[in-house]
Structure formats: C-alpha cells, structure tokens
Amino acid sequence: MTTPKTATLTLGEQSMELPVYSGSLGPDVIDIGKLYAAMDVFTFDPGFTSTGSCESKITFIDGDKGELLYRGYPIDQLAEKSHYLEVCYLLLYGELPSATQLEDFETRVTRHTMLHEQMQGFYKGFRRDAHPMAIVCGVVGAMSAFYHDSTDITDPWQREVATIRLIAKLPTIVAWAYKYSIGQPFIYPRNDLDYASNFLHMCFATPAEEYHVDPILARAMDRIFTLHADHEQNASTSTVRLAGSSGANPFACIAAGVACLWGPSHGGANEACLQMLREIGTVDKIPEYVARAKDKDDPFRLMGFGHRVYKNFDPRAKVMKESADEVLGLLGVEDNETLKVAKELERIALEDPYFVEKKLYPNVDFYSGIILEAMGFPTSMFTALFAMSRTVGWISQWKEMIEEKSKIGRPRQLYTGAANRDYVEVENR
Ligand code: CMC
C-alpha cells in the first residue's frame, strides 16, 4: 500500500488533505478514517458502491475486464489445472502448496470430515420440510457448541483447527441436510475419496447398495466448488468480517455468512434462476418475461443476470458454461426443456439493447443451477452447495481480518427520523 497522492476535501470554509492509497491492482482508495474527527461529517454510500471496507491480499476482481484472481492466479487457470483443496490452501495461506504441503493439508482436512455423533440429534429437531439453508445455518452455528476447543480466536492454533474443521465438515453438514430432507439415512464420509467424490457419495449413496461416483461428475463438482470459493468483499463475506470484528467465534461468523448468502440477490440466485426457467416453461414465453424484466413498474428481474462488479462478463460463468455442456453431454440431457429455455433466454438477453446497455450478462448462477439439476440435486440444495464452496473464502477473509487485529466494524448513518421530543403519556396522545 503506497501513499504518493492526497485528495483535498473542501467543505464550506474548511478543507482537509486525505491520504490516497494505491493497491497492487485496482482503483486507488481515499482514506477518510480521520474525516469525522477533523470535519464532523460522515460519508454516505448505502450499498457500498464506492466504499472499500478493508485491505485484503486474497482475491481481486476487475469488473471491466471480467477478471477474477485468487492470490493473483486467474480463475480459469485454477479451474482447469488445479483442484478445490489446492485452491483452499492457496486462499488460506497465500501460495500454491508444495507436494508435501498439499498432502499434509489434505490429510488434515480428511481427518476432520466426521461430525460429532450427537449432532445427528440436532438434525432430527428440524421439520422434515425445512429448507437445507435453514439447517446448514443452524448446524454451522451449533458447531460452536460441539467444538469448544477451537473457539478461542486469540489462539492461532485454535483458529487453524476451526478453519480445517469448517472446510472438512461442511460437505457432511450439507449432504446430511439433503439426506434428512428426503428421509434417507445419513451416509458417513469416506476418507479414501477425494473431496468432491466424497460429497457426491454422501449425497447419493445409500447403505443398501454400492454407489460409484462418476469421475467426470466429480470433476465438474470440484470445479463448481473452485469457482465459488471466494469473491472478495461481497455481501456474505462482509457479513462474516463484520460478525468477526466483534470477536465472535468462527462458527458463529460463518453461520452469519450462510444466512446472508441465502438471499436471492446473492447466493439464492441459483435456486431462483432455475425456478424462473421452470416458470417460463417454454421458449415461446420468453419474450413475455424479458418484457417484464425491462418494465420499471414490475419488480421481476431475470435471475442469473447482472452483477454489481462484473460489467463485461462473469469469468466464472464462462468456465461454468463449458462445464454445463460437458455434464449435460455426459448425462444425455441436452434435449431438456429447461435447458432449451435457458439457451434461448441467454441468446435473446445478450442481443437485447436493455441488457446490452446496462451490461447485464449471465452470471455464475445462471449456469450452475442447470448443472446441479442435471446431477440430481433439488433446487433447494443449490444455495447450500454454494455455502459449502464459499466457506473457505469466508474463513480465509476472517483469518486475515483477525491476524490484522482490525477494529470492530461500526458504520454510521444519515439520520432522518424525528428530532428530540418529549414523551407523551398514553392518555394525552
Ligand atoms: N434483470 C433486469 N434488470 C436488471 C437486472 C436483472 N437481473 N439486474 C439489474 N437490472 C437493472 C436494474 O433494474 C437497474 O436498472 P435502472 O438503472 O434502470 O434502475 C440496473 O440494471 C442496475 O441494477 P442495480 O440493482 O442497481 O445493480 P446492482 O449492482 O445493485 O445489483 C444484482 C446487482 C446482482 C443484485 C442484480 O443485477 C440482480 O438483482 N440480478 C439478479 C440476481 C442474481 O442473479 N444475483 C446473483 C449475482 S452472482 C452470484 C453472487 O455473487 O452472489
């Protein structure tokens, strides 16, 4: 972080020099940390469209170029050449691992895949029709009640154990949420399988017969995990950082991230997108829905389109689209009606001046739902899969924040409510 420049802020008679920092990539930032003390004003940026909330070395997005880097490495290279656990190591520790470091990391993750047996009782407290995200949010939060020996955030060793536990146990937590919802027995993790294969096994195997994980599906699953692993200071990550800034334990912070991710403007978009494609139903109905998306008086939006940061294309969507073609080819579902609607919708929206002018492109969620459905996941599981993949990003960002000893996050406001007034007794109102 360098400070070659300053910005001058003038307000009436007063003026102030504000330091300007340059990162290794991306726009400069103006440091307004001392503004309130010096000039008695706050900045105002609801939705944080022009606000950098922290310094970070983990992930970089260039929205104009459609570029996503994890620790400097482009996402398309990682999706093609690496695999999820290696990417987890990279995000957490900053560098690609040596062969020995990777083996050690994989062993550590693998040794933590089982859930405390008593947690099964916790699952059984949920209604059978509970949304998997409700269960995942609850069970992740409940980890703080089961793993007391990794909740002291001042101890680096406990932070490390909590990190490994979260990455290792999330597949089990998510797979069991699915098993519970369909009334099948929980399948225990298999540590002889790789991360993605083990997850597919826990979702789709039953004790009654042998289940063989298709390596192409496992590879596609692993790529979905990699593409979702981190995305700098998005809503759920900022939620995790804010929760963590108060000193809350890591399991509570990740549960907060899961809750935030659930919303349809964020991680919930993959579920909402597939529901929308099904609602459209047939290709001839597309113009009606495109017209609704363009109508200012209609709240309807094309789910899976648009992004706060990407204004060219979403690089994750590009890789996801290739994966979708591969998986659908393998499963022989290219003729599926939902897929036809998706392809035609994509074609129409990409040519429509409304979407072109507003730079609204298909995002990662547009394609991920199509692959996940083809693999046999119900739509309600889509966001839970996103949460599982993003856990490493959340915990990496949380770890970075704790190691930097940040202050508690405490934004201020523009108050427009009633001014000071005296209480009026009920009989006088
Ligand atoms: N369909 C129709 N119009 C849209 C859409 C859409 N999907 N997205 C944005 N717009 C319009 C919006 O109406 C607005 O128009 P105007 O300027 O005339 O008022 C303009 O584009 C800018 O929209 P915005 O809401 O100010 O943009 P934002 O940066 O606040 O929102 C977004 C980004 C992702 C929330 C939004 O594009 C959206 O709601 N998309 C659909 C939901 C979705 O797919 N979300 C997943 C995002 S990727 C996964 C993740 O990282 O979580």
Image (cartoon, grey):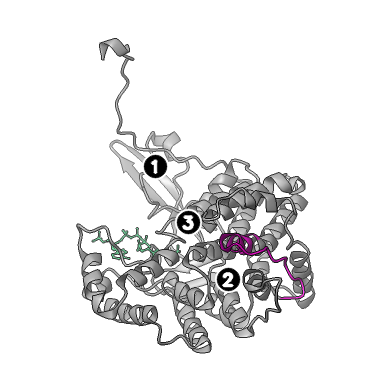
The image position of residue 22, as x and y in percent, is: 49, 60
Q: Amino acid at mark 1?
A: Met
The image position of residue 95, as x and y in percent, is: 67, 70
Which of pointers 3 and 2 lies earlier in the amino acid sequence? Answer: 2
Q: Secondary structure at mark 2?
A: helix
Q: Residue at x 41, y 74 (%)?
A: 65
Which residue is at the front of the view, 114 or 149?
A: 114
Distance CA(mark 3)–CA(mark 1): 42 Å
Distance CA(mark 1)–CA(mark 2): 46 Å
Residues at discs 3 and 1 in contact (Cβ within 8 Å): no
Q: Is residue 118 magenta?
A: no
Q: Tell me the crowding category of disc 3: few under 14, some 14 to 19, or many 20 or more residues within 10 angstroms, Cα based.
A: many
Q: Amino acid at mark 2?
A: Phe
Q: Which residues are magenta?
A: 173-193
Q: Secondary structure at mark 3?
A: loop
Q: Amino acid at mark 3?
A: Trp
Which residue is at the front of the view, 421 or 189?
A: 189
The image position of residue 46, as x and y in percent, is: 36, 48
The residue beneath circle 3 is 262
- Is residue 54 visible in the rendered structure shown here? no
The residue beneath circle 2 is 225
Q: Quadrant of the C terminus?
A: top left
The residue beneath circle 1 is 16
Q: Residue at x 35, y 73 (%)?
A: 361
